[in-house]
Image (tube, rainbow, N blue to C red):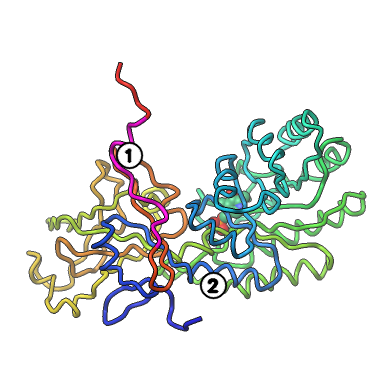
Amino acid sequence: MSSTPAIHRENGTLYIEGVSCSALAKQYGTPLYVYSRRALTEAYNAYASSGAKVHVAVKANSNLGVLSLFARLGAGFDIVTGGELARVLAAGGKASNVVFSGVGKSADEMRYALREGVKCFNVESAPELERLNDVAGEMGLKAPVSLRVNPDVDPKTHPYISTGLKGNKFGVAFSDALGTYKRAQEMPHVQVSGIDCHIGSQITDIAPYLDALDRVLDLVAKLKAEGVPIAHIDVGGGLGIDYGNGDAPPKTEQFVSTIISRIHEQEPTAEVWFEPGRSLLGNAGVLLTTVEYLKPGEEKNFCIVDAGMNDLARPSMYDAFHDIVPVVETAERGEDAASTNGVDGGATTWEIVGPVCESGDWLGHDRALAVQPGDVLAILSAGAYGFTMASNYNTRPRPAELVVDGETVHVVRERETVQSLFAGEHLI
Ligand SMILES: *Cc1c(COP(=O)(O)O)cnc(C)c1O
């Protein structure tokens, strides 16, 4: 593999592998999601080379083309709905490689997952366990389960993406876990297979994982003493990425090997499972957008672009930072854009905002950029929780999605048409 990063500059122009982002914007229009096959492959291999079992969190990026690449790499998948299972199967993934997480599994979703033969249900509550036992019983099957336990540790991330605290809706409370496992052991239609824990997302420090793991390993020892077999330990996902704002998460290889050795110290035969999403996909994708208007003002200068909160929800939803860069650097364009946009002084900072009718429709605050209408900007680190969180608010068709593989461009999702947005609606 080449040592040039998959997303890089050549003569001042941003490239995804062998294809320039200018050319992509011109040919396919903006807003446009572009993913690099090489970047996601490298991110996957950083996990998989350890021998751990990797289940790609489908909710981070559920495009069929993207999932098909992971399926070919031999990945498993972590799903939270029946819809995501259908996507995995349509992309060529195997149900026998799927773990089913989520707090609100319906009986229909359980039936579907049992019929297809998923590898494990990550059960998040006692009533869910009862329901799963009933549903599997009706079908004459035994459901493989692990309990998602809530270790009550603070992952020190955004409150909306922390999931392992007592006050979160996720998982079985730590104090109830032993009792719930014992109950599972008595059930005729569930089969205990392992234990699971997922404490949050965009975690940039390994310490909360080790804290959670200590608690989980304590529990595993108790479970074994009670005769409950724990063949796998699933440490969830959540490893953060560098969004370009100073976060410095550990390298995947280092993170994975630290976790595995800690588990194997105590449980040398346990299989170790991961459920990463963001750390596989986040930095493998960008969102390209075109500058529509510049609106310099007394207090703020607005740079209005053609992508909005409906295309990329993370800034408005989590106050998240995404680096925003010009696709063609100013020096290469041969002019000083800042001097021609009506604002004095080259060092202009901009509020990068979308066209959606909400003041919360912003993509970046206070960005120093030399821009002109018509320029294409790249919103970086948009490969995870980008398209999957997009909506049609303001009747905006969702962007096209591309996968670049070397010099080859695959359209893995066509841009939506306005017609398709109201195809299922009816006049009275
Ligand atoms: C969202 C989610 C993940 C993936 O989290 P990332 O932060 O994207 O790695 C893994 N497991 C479960 C249960 C999840 O809900």
User: Disc 2 marks which amino acid?
Assistant: Glu
So how many labels did they put on this image?
A: 2
Name the disc covering residue 11, or none.
Answer: none
Which of these two is toward me, 22 or 252?
22
Q: Residues within 10 Å of mark 1 (few under 14, many from 20)?
A: some
Where is residue 95? Give x, y as percent. 67, 49
Q: How crowded is mark 2: few (under 14 residues within 10 Å), some or many (20 or more)?
A: some
User: Disc 1 marks which amino acid?
Assistant: Tyr
Q: Does the residue labelled 1 lie within 8 Å of ligand 1?
A: no
Residue at the spot of label 1: 393
Where is residue 389? Give x, y as percent. 43, 47
Q: Does the magenta stretch include residue 248?
A: no
Q: Disc 1 versus disc 2: distance between alpha carbons?
A: 34 Å
Name the disc covering residue 42, or none.
Answer: 2
Q: Give the range drawn in magenta.
A: 410-423
SS at mark 2?
Answer: helix
Q: Residue at x 54, y 66 (%)?
A: 204
